[in-house]
Amino acid sequence: MIKIYTRRGDSGLTDLIGGIRIKKNDVRLEAYGTVDELSSHLGLLAAWMEGDDEHDTVLRIQNDLFYVGSHLATDQTTTRLFASAILPEGETTMLEEHIDLMQAQLPELHGFILPGGCQAAAQAHVCRTVCRRAERRVLTLAEVAPVDDDVIHFLNRLSDYLFVLAKKINFHAGRNEIMWENACK
């Protein structure tokens, strides 16, 4: 059995796909590390969604995030993208289709909602905010390195999907959204 630790990272460096070593606080590592964090949060969400018709979609998204992470972990100035680093065609459209289907089942939104509700919906909101952070980190990376537009579009749409998913989960759980009350009215 291969040991999980190598001690190669003890100096604060890690390997990219292709073998290039970078600092662990590099903007590239921040980008794909946040995508990995999002995938972990989605795993918790999926655990709370057993039996929900969107459960398999959440698992599919986790798989898609591996493509995204591999893409971000490849310095395209020195290493070509492998197939495992290219988001399959149509995944952003798939998210849009799921958003449209869920929204068609939900009451219209009138105001700002506070994240929360049942556990799964609250976790979907956590995933949404981590996804927004991942998107910001990827945009920062895109200022200094090539990042395919598909990756940026996917993350942007994913946060929308997670917002609508949280609403759907609460709706099907019989939980009312908690609306923001503007005390300055």
Image (spheres, helix red, strand yellow):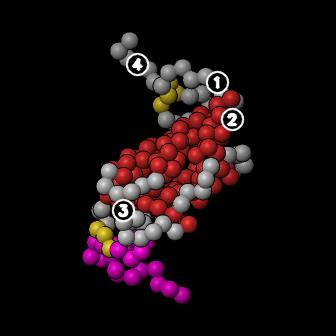
Crowding around mark 2 (Cα neighbors within 10 Å: few <14, some 14 to 19, many 20+) is: few
Residue 117 vs residue 10: left or right?
right
Residue 1 vs residue 20: left or right?
right
Instruction: Tell me the distance, in whole angstroms, between the alpha carbons under discs 4 and 1.
Output: 21 Å
Q: Main secondary structure of the magenta part?
A: loop
Q: For the point 56% across and 66% down, which residue is it?
A: 83
Q: Secondary structure at mark 2?
A: helix
Residue 66 versus residue 90 in the image, above or below: below
Answer yes or no: is residue 124 visible.
no
Q: Check disc 1 and report the residue beneath it.
A: 107
Q: For the point 64% across and 24% down, which residue is it?
A: 107
Q: Amino acid at mark 4?
A: Asn
Image quarter where the N terminus lies is: bottom right
The label number, if any, that marks residue 101 in the structure image: 2
The region drawn magenta spans 1-20
Q: Amino acid at mark 3?
A: Leu
Instruction: Tell me the distance, in whole angstroms, between the alpha carbons under discs 4 and 3.
Output: 39 Å
Give the label, 4 or 2, closer to the camera: 2
Residue 118 versus residue 51 in the image, above or below: above
Q: Position of residue 103 (x, y in %)?
A: 64, 31
Q: Amino acid at mark 2?
A: Leu
Say which label, 4 or 1, has the lower sequence index.
1
Give the label, 2 or 1, closer to the camera: 2
Q: Quadrant of residue 141?
A: bottom left
Instruction: Tell me the distance, in whole angstroms, between the alpha carbons under discs 3 and 2.
Output: 35 Å
The label number, if any, that marks residue 29 in the structure image: 3
Give the label, 1 or 3, closer to the camera: 3
Q: For the point 48% across and 31% down, which residue is it?
A: 114
